[in-house]
Image: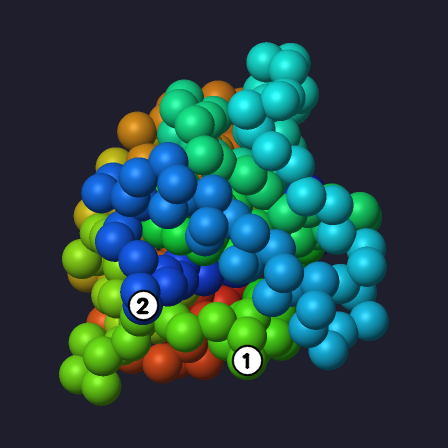
Amino acid sequence: MDNNIVISTRIRLARNLKDYPFPCRLSDKGKTEVDEKVRKALINGNSAIAKDFQYIDFDNMSETMKVSLVEKHLVSPEFISNTSGRAVLLLNNGTVSIMLNEEDHIRLQVIENGFCLDEAYDLADKLDTLLDEQLNFAFNEKLGYLTQCPTNLGTGMRASVMLHLPALKKSGAMNMLANNLNKLGLTIRGAHGEGSSSEGAIYQLSNQVSLGISEKSAIENLKNITNQL
């Protein structure tokens, strides 16, 4: 598909450590421990790319750098609003970021140029498996991965594509389109996610359902609807 329409692809996985409260109830000492456990799990894991990650403590980062990471979609706007006890692991080529102590202990995301959901998921899944070998994730047989927000229960995955849709926006079709997408288990938002505006007619289309559906099914659904758009 033309990269002028599908600008980029993102896979995001939410994970939490079993022995710690969610970040909203976690002490500063606990956040530091989570940061260190995840950092060691990645670096000590059996992966060739582990050495290509850099660990960044957000307490020691300039405001300009923080905003730059948001603009590149490597961290969320919420992540830089309160940086106490927060850190990020960044792959040198800028395609992977692992936010520590955002809404969940771990927010692992892979961002690729163009329309490549399968490739992005494959890398995210390999990194998730790598961390899972070293860490004890909070998991329930019925509910799947446990997350701070109930809407992320299950797979803990959000798959999304960034779309440039100037004609649909100008024609006034976006509201009707958004309502129809909701019925299909998808949601369309501004470029920076929930509550953000659609400047430049750039939208983020993602799966809305993560409970009772597999990662592969969610990706196939998103892929089919994107092709129709």
Q: Position of residue 67 (x, y in %)?
A: 58, 20
**Which residue bears the numbered disc 2?**
18
User: At numbered mark 1, what does the secondary structure look like: helix, strand or loop?
Assistant: helix
User: Image height check: is 59 above or below 175?
Assistant: above
Callout 1: 10 Å neighbours few (<14), some, many (20+)? few
Q: Of the residues shown, which amino acid type is indicated by label 2?
A: Lys
Depth check, front residue: 8 or 133:
133
Q: Of the residues shown, which amino acid type is indicated by label 1?
A: Glu
Depth check, front residue: 128 or 170:
128
Determine the residue positioned at 36% across, 61% down: 16
Q: Where is residue 27 in the image (x, y as percent from the top left)?
A: 30, 39
Q: Which of the labelled discs sits on residue 133, or is there none?
A: 1
Q: Is residue 218 left or right of residue 86?
A: left
Determine the residue positioned at 55% across, 24% down: 59
Counting residues from the start of the chain, the first of labels 2 and 1 encountered is 2
Depth check, front residue: 50 or 115:
50
Callout 2: 10 Å neighbours few (<14), some, many (20+)? few
User: Image height check: is 10 above or below 57?
Assistant: below
Q: Position of residue 3 (x, y in %)?
A: 70, 49
